[in-house]
Amino acid sequence: MNSVNKPQEADLYKPIQAHFVREGYEVYGEVKDCDMAIVKDDELLIVELKLNLSVDLLIQATKRQRLSEHVYVAIPKPKNKKKSKRWTDICQLVRRLELGLILVSFSNKSKNMEVAFHPTPFNRQKNIGQNKRKRQQVLKEIDGRSADFNIGGSNRTQILTAYRENCIQIACYLEKIGELSPKTLVEMGTGEKTSSILTKNYYGWFERVRRGVYVLSEKGKKETKNYPELLMHYKEKIPENEKNKA
C-alpha cells in the first residue's frame, strides 16, 4: 500500500492468492490479459481486480466468461455500503451477469478477503416468481390507465398515475354534470375507489356539499385543466342520460 494508505489494484492480489492456495489451487498473475488465473485439475477460475465496481470492470469480466464460467470481480470492501439499497442493487446486477464477487478488506498490517458470492447461473424465471407482487402492481397500474400520457424518462414533471387519472375522471364528471354521489359516479364507471378518493381528497379537488354528495372545487377546476386530452377522453364517455342532466 502506498504512502497515503490508498490501496492499489496490486494490493488486492496477495490475499486472494493466499486464499486460493490454501484451497489447493495454483494461482498465476497477468495471464493473457487476465489479472488472475487460478487452476485446479481442469477447473479454471479467473479474477479481475479493480478499485471500484464500474461498468468497465463488468465488461472486462463478462469478456472473461468466454474463457471460463467461473469468473470473479474483486474490489476493496466498501465501508458502510453493504446494507444500502444501492449496494444491494449492484450485487443483484453482478449476480445477474453470473459473476462472483470477492471483497478485500485492509487493516493496519493485514489484508483479508471474503467471497461475497460465487458465480452461479442466473434463474430468470425464479427471479420473476420472487417478484410476482411487483409484477402484478405494474400490470395493475397499466390496466388503470386509459392511454399513455407520460413521457418515458421524465424526472421533473408530474407523472400521470392510474390514481391521478381516476381522480381526473371523477373531476370531469363533476364539472360536466354537477353534484353527484359516489354511487352514481361508480355507476358511470369511475371504479371501486371512488368513495375513498372523494373522502380522502388528497389533491383538494373535491368538496362535500352534503352527506354523500360532492362537487368539484375551484382548485380542482383549475388544476384539471392541465389535462385537456384526458378531460376530452372522459367527457366522451359520459352516458347520454347523464349528459342530458348537465
Image (tube, grey):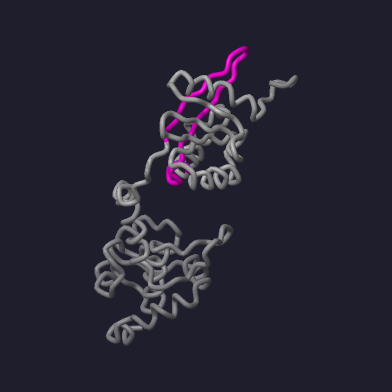
Report the number of numbered marks.
0
Q: Is residue 204 visible?
A: yes
- Name the foreground residue: 222 vs 139: 139
Q: Residue at x 53, y 31 (%)?
A: 81
Q: Is residue 133 visible?
A: no
- Name the foreground residue: 4 vs 216: 4
Q: Residue at x 72, y 21 (%)?
A: 2
Q: Residue at x 60, y 45 (%)?
A: 56
Residue 94 percent location from the top left of the image: 47, 42
Q: Say above or below: 102 vs 67.
A: above
Q: Quadrant location of residue 111?
A: top right
Residue 70 percent location from the top left of the image: 44, 38
Q: Residue at x 55, y 44 (%)?
A: 58
Q: Residue furthest right?
A: 3
Residue 137 located within the stretch drawn in magenta:
no
* The residue stretch that appears in magenta: 94-118
Q: Quadrant of the C terminus?
A: bottom left
Q: Residue furthest front?
A: 41
